[in-house]
Amino acid sequence: MNFSGIEFQRVSKDFQIYKAIVSNDHIKNIYLHLIEAGAKLLCLWGEDNGEIVDRYYLNITFYLNENLLILKLHLDSHNPHYQDLTPIFPSANRMQRAVFDLLGIKAMQTKDERSWLSHHKWPTNYFPLQKEDSSVKGITKCTRPYSFMRVSGQGVHEIPVGPIHAGIIEPGHFRFQVVGEKILRLEARLGYKHKGIEKRFEKLHFFEAAKLAGRISGDSTVAFSWAYAMAIETVSDILPPKRALWIRALLLERERMMNHLGDIGALINDTGFAFGLAHFSRLKEDMLRINDLIFGHRYLMDLIIPGGVQSDLNDEALDQIRDELAIIKNEIQELKKIIDQHGGVQDRFNGTGILNKSQAEDLEVLGLCARASGIHCDQRVHNPTFPYTDLKVNEIIKSQGDVWARAEVRFGELFESIRILNHILHELKITKDIIAVNIHELPANKEGYGWVEGFRGAVFIALKTGKDNFLSRVHPHDPSSLNWPALELAVLGNIVADFPLINKSFNLNYAGHDL
């Protein structure tokens, strides 16, 4: 594949993923051509090979139509740096700052050099993902306050919220600049629970690492597990049996449904209509109990393995799931009628937290938040892999961009997941096959990629193999990384009291972000 005069090599015969090695000299022209062609930035991550020559690379991934394009930017081994992407791709800002914190790879002439993950608590010249041991470790006392962007003027005041919140949620700090109750600016700060997951991957056998992939984010364990397995299978040049892929899709759609049920209940509860929370929580709990009964885990962990899945489903289990779906569908239909006619819910949802299509496009927002603003981006539709090639997913799109639109997308996807699951149950009933192929050995120094549409949006994993079936580099990417700035924009002009409602309507991931 040739793009902008650059020859891209196809990474796998089964997926539309292409890769090219480029230098700093030509990168700006490539960026401009990508913008003209309508490409969107997905993620970027750094890489230290530990070699004297060809030590550092910056990997920048774009999606263009049905293709994934990966630029491997070759960097200077002694002074790794690259041209700042943010003038062309503003959403690169926090990813660039994370790359510097982890590897010391610097974006030149950037206007924002604040740390993102280290919080200035890691010692100077300590970069945890560098292969060469700097002999500098430990946590230092931070003496520099974080420089939040501020708004000034008569009557403007500041409200700091978090990072510790009233509830069992993960830590994040929100700095509001307000006049009266109206929000003029919001800036989020994350990274309080940086877990070192990328470093941990480097110490694991690829099969053990599958369990770690499933624990990157508990509510997206199926999506991350499938993306990781797909990346390993790309490296191994194998395709899992079709029955295993049908079961993977069944697990992924159940994960989507459980999260959407929980989110809708939480949203309705924020309007003061506790009846909705009680019923949607009950429906989610019913699914969790069926999961435990059939799959042995309420949240479906460790069921996807490289090469296939751990266990099969018998006809009795398939019938049980079919009966469960019929009950849930009827109950959601009845509950939606009540919510559609509830004045309090409608008043709080409609027109609150608007993210319009232009804003969502500029920030390269992904997933259900993008679809609620009129953007077509469901990878099950636009870049489907089997069995989604056969399932023909109907993409749920709304244009209003407010809390109501994000709730409506969730409702639409619930009903679509039920249709998909019934199709999958039929296929599993009439076809028999093995559920896994063994992968005994990985070739060293090869790269693999996995891309799966989770309930929040596109989950992506890139990995590079090392020696003896270990991994030398793994980068997981959650769609929330691109969606956090959109939340900051959507709250502007709203009152502070509506922030929890708007925040829940985005339901962004802290754990999958603070890797």
Image: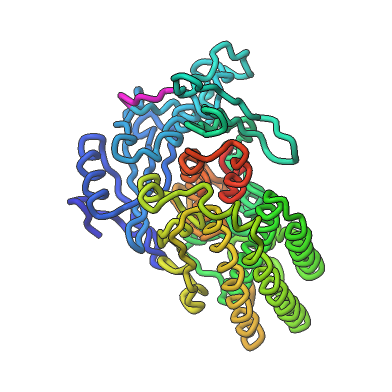
Give percent across and percent down for residue 278. Answer: 78, 59
Q: Name the quarter where the N terminus is drawn.
A: bottom left
Q: Residue furthest front?
A: 343
**Residue placed most toward the observer, 299 or 476:** 299
In which image quadrant can residue 324 be found? bottom right
- The residue that appears at 54% across and 55% down in the rendered structure is 350
In which image quadrant can residue 22 be found? top left
Residue 317 appears left or right of 439: right
Q: Does any portion of residue 338 appear in the rendered image?
A: yes
Q: Is residue 34 above or below residue 343?
A: above
Give percent across and percent down for residue 439. Answer: 58, 62
**Residue placed most toward the observer, 506 or 114:** 506
Q: Residue furthest top?
A: 143
**Residue placed most toward the observer, 302 or 466:** 302
**Residue placed most toward the observer, 337 or 11:** 337
- The residue that appears at 26% across and 38% down in the rendered structure is 23
Q: Is residue 414 above or below residue 140?
A: below
Magenta residues span 108-113
- The residue that appears at 49% across and 45% down in the rendered structure is 483
- The residue that appears at 68% across and 55% down in the rendered structure is 268
